[in-house]
Image (cartoon, coloured by chain):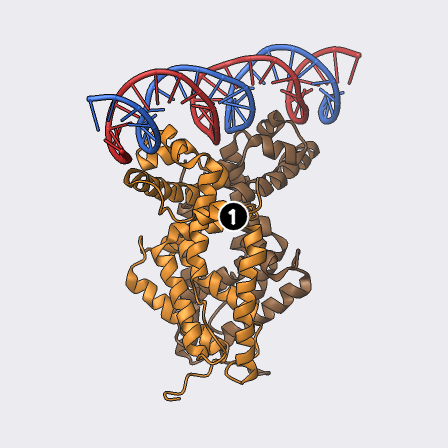
Chain colours: A brown, B orange, C blue, D red
Amino acid sequence: MGSQLDDAALDRALDTEGGAIRQRNEREILDAAERVFSRHGYRGASLKLIAEEAGLPKSNILYYMGSKKALYVRLLEGVMERWNTMLDDISVEDDPAEVLSAFIRSKMEMSRRYPEASRLFAGEILQGAPFLQDFLRGELRDWVEGRAEVFRQWAERGLMDPVDPVSLIFLIWSATQHYADFEAQVAGITGHEHFTDDDMQRVTDFLVQVVLKGCGVVSAPTGH
Amino acid sequence: MGSQLDDAALDRALDTEGGAIRQRNEREILDAAERVFSRHGYRGASLKLIAEEAGLPKSNILYYMGSKKALYVRLLEGVMERWNTMLDDISVEDDPAEVLSAFIRSKMEMSRRYPEASRLFAGEILQGAPFLQDFLRGELRDWVEGRAEVFRQWAERGLMDPVDPVSLIFLIWSATQHYADFEAQVAGITGHEHFTDDDMQRVTDFLVQVVLKGCGVVSAPTGH
DNA sequence: GTTATTCTTGACCAATCGGTCAGCTTCTTC
DNA sequence: GAAGAAGCTGACCGATTGGTCAAGAATAAC
C-alpha cells in the first residue's frame, strides 16, 4: 500500500477535464464510492458494491478510475482539498473569540454537510493512515503549527489562557467530527433518527460556549 | 448482518470456561483479532490475516470461534463489558468537579491502555453500528440518561452552568477517544511517534481544566 | 492401558475479489 | 457520411474469501 499521494494525480483532484459524459459518470462513481468506502474502509469496500451503488457495471468503474486504489486516493484528495481551505488566513491581530467561534462553526458545518467525507477520512486514520502519512507529517502539520503559533501569541497578550494550542485544536477537531463519524451512536442515544439543523445549531452553540469559556477567551470589545 | 447481541453469547463474554489449552488459544486469537479488526473493519479483516497474526492455522481459528461473525461479536462484547463498569455509581450528592475529572481521566486511561478496543468500537460505529444498534438504543442510552439527570440537578443547585448534559458527555467521549482512534493523526502531527505517558498526562490535565472551567463547575469546598 | 474427548490441520469447496480484454455501440469531427 | 475517438460491458482470469470436513495427534478420564 502506497504511503503518499502521487503529485500528478493531485493536480487532477478536481474533475474539470474530459467530456460531459465523463464528468457526469465520474461524479456518480465518486459519490457512490465515498458512501461505500466510508462505511466499510478501504479493504472492506468492493468494486461490486460501489458499482451497484452507482448503478453502473463494474467494468465501467474500472474504465473511468483505473483501479480501486486510484479511486480511493482520488477521493482522499478531494477531502484534503476542502480541508485545506479552512481558517487559512488568521493573524495575531484577529479577535480570538471570533476566530475560535468561526473555526468550530465551520467544522460543524462540514460534519453536517459532508458526513461521508468525514467518515472516509476517519477510516483512513483508523487503519493507520497508509495513504495520508505524508500529508499528516507535512501540510497538515505545518497548518497546525501556524494556528498554534497564533494561539500562543494571543495567550501572551492575555487574550486567552496559556493552554496548549495543539491540544486545543485536537479538542475542536474531535468534538466536531464526532457528529459525523459517530453519527450512528449519536442517533441511537438521542433517539433523533436524523440530527436536524436545529440540533446541530444547539450543539454548535454549546461547543462555542464551553471552549471559549474553558480557554478563558476574552470577548471582543464591540468597537476597534 | 445481525443487529443484536445474542443473549446466550453475552453470558460467555468472558472466557472462563474450557480447559487450559482452550483458554490460552482463545486469548491469543482474541488479541490478534482485535488488532486486525480494529485496523481493517469487519469486512476488511480476513481470517487468514488473523490466523497469521495469532500464529495459528486458519482452521484453528474457526475451530475455536465458529465463524468470523461470532469472533467479531465476541470482541465487541468484551469492549462493551469494560465500558459498562465506568462511572456507574454517581449521585447528586457527589462533587461535580471530582466526578467530571474522574470521568475524563478514566476515559483517557482507557484510550491509553486499550487503543485497539477503542478503534474496534469506532469502526463498528463508522459502518453504522450493525451489531451494536440495540446496545446503543438500550443500555448505553439509559446510562447516558442517568448521568445526564445528575448533571442537570447539579446545574439546578448552581454547582455548574446549565449546559446540555448529553452534549457534554459527547464532548468528553470524543475528546478522549480521539487519542486512541486518531492515534496515527496525533502521532503524525506532533512528531511523537508514540505518545508517552507524560504526553497523555499533559493532555488529560488540559481537558480537565478546559471542560471544568468551560462548564462553570464550582470547585469543591475542602470540607463538608 | 484403554476409552473418550479435545485438539489440530491440510485438502477442498463455492463464492467473491480486483483486474483484463475483445468486441461492440455511441459520440465527435471534418 | 466516413473515420477516429470515446464509451460500454459481458466473459473471463488467477487469487483470495469464509467455511467444511475427515483423519490423525494429543490429552483427559477411568
Residue B221: x and y, percent?
Answer: 40, 87
| Front in this rendered view, residue A137 or B14 | B14
Relative to B166, residue B91 above or below: below
- Quick one: B53 or B5, which is closer to the camera? B5
Name the residue type under label 1. Answer: Asp
Quarter of the image where one finds residue A223 = bottom right
The C terminus of chain A: image quadrant: bottom right
Where is residue A159? Give x, y as percent: 46, 79
- Residue lying at 63% horizontally and 41% vertically, measured from the top left: A31
* Residue of label 1: B7
Bin the neighbour count of mark 1 within 10 Å (Cα to Cα): few under 14, some 14-19, many 20 and up.
few
Could you tell me residue B59's position as x and y percent? 38, 28
Q: Is residue A121 above or below residue B51?
A: below
Element class at badge 1: helix
On screen, residue D28 versus residue C27, left or right, reads left
Residue A54 appears in view: yes
Q: Which residue is at a point 47% across and 66% down the rendered structure image?
A: B172
Q: B53 or A87, which is in the foreground?
A: B53
Q: In this view of the protein, which residue sits in the foreground, B152 or A39? A: B152
**Dot 1 falls on which chain?**
B
Q: How many marks?
A: 1
The answer to whether A224 appears left or right of B206 in the picture is right
Residue at x 58% of width, y 61% of height: A108
Residue B182, can we see it?
A: no
User: Whole-percent x and y of residue A195?
Assistant: 65, 59
The quadrant in which the N terminus of chain A is found is top left
